[in-house]
Image (cartoon, rainbow, N blue to C red):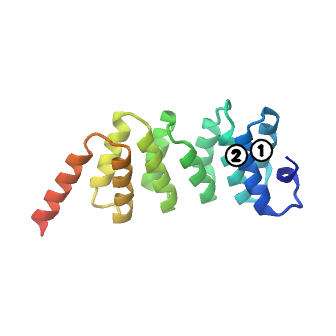
Amino acid sequence: MYVTEDAGASSGPRRLACISVGKIGRPEDFEVIERLYYESEDAMLRSYALAGLAEFEGHDITQVLIQALKRDTFWRIRLTAAEKLSGAAEASELLQYKAENDPVPQVKIASLKSLGTVSGGRNAQFLLEYFTDDRKSIDMRLACLLVLVENTIPGTLDAIENLMEKLWKKD
């Protein structure tokens, strides 16, 4: 545990130690990683601390992840939060917003992937509409298609067929 708290230690091992400590999951270590997340000046270390917090079993950090995705200016922290919100139904609206509006493509894709893991008609509908929206970049639409296929979202085949039909008529 000393590596994570040692400000003089190399940043690489400190970052990786945050995730390892979270995977080990000793309850007494949670506060140390949480303190690193909230107090560190190093944004990369904060990103790894957030990922480490998400690894602890028995601790619901959904609200911390939601706040990180909403407010953090460092894109890697938003990326980590979006990835770790996979399956969190209460974050669906925020994930949809980030998929539409985040300036960083990696955060958009992570948001789409997390939406795909949350069961529910609104998320499926959002993903289908996102995929068929020709105003979106082709890269984002392909990422969304991958999410639709990997999560076997109902309506994916119809959306693909409709899109193909539109493209064939156009050409």
Residue 53 location in percent, x, y? 69, 42
Q: Amino acid at mark 2?
A: Gly
- For the point 44% across and 40% down, the residue is 117
- Label placed on residue 76: none
Q: Foreground: 83 or 149?
A: 149
Decide which of tag 1 and tag 2 comes sooner along the chain: 1
* Residue at the front extreme, as displayed: 24
Q: Is residue 119 above or below residue 2?
A: above
The reply to whether residue 166 is visible in this rendering is yes
Q: Are marks 1 and 2 in contact (CB under 8 Å)?
A: yes
Q: Quick one: quadrant of the C terminus?
A: bottom left
- For the point 79% across and 48% down, the residue is 36
Residue 149 location in percent, x, y? 33, 49
Q: Dot 2, crowdedness within 10 Å: few (<14), some or many (≥20)?
A: many
* Residue at the bottom extreme, as displayed: 171
Q: Which residue is mark 2?
A: 52
Q: Secondary structure at mark 1?
A: helix
- Measure the C-alpha gap from mark 1 to mark 2: 7 Å
The reply to whether residue 103 is visible in this rendering is no
Q: Amino acid at mark 1?
A: Ile
Q: Is residue 119 left or right of residue 45?
A: left
- Label placed on residue 33: 1
Residue 110 location in percent, x, y? 49, 52
Q: Secondary structure at mark 2?
A: helix
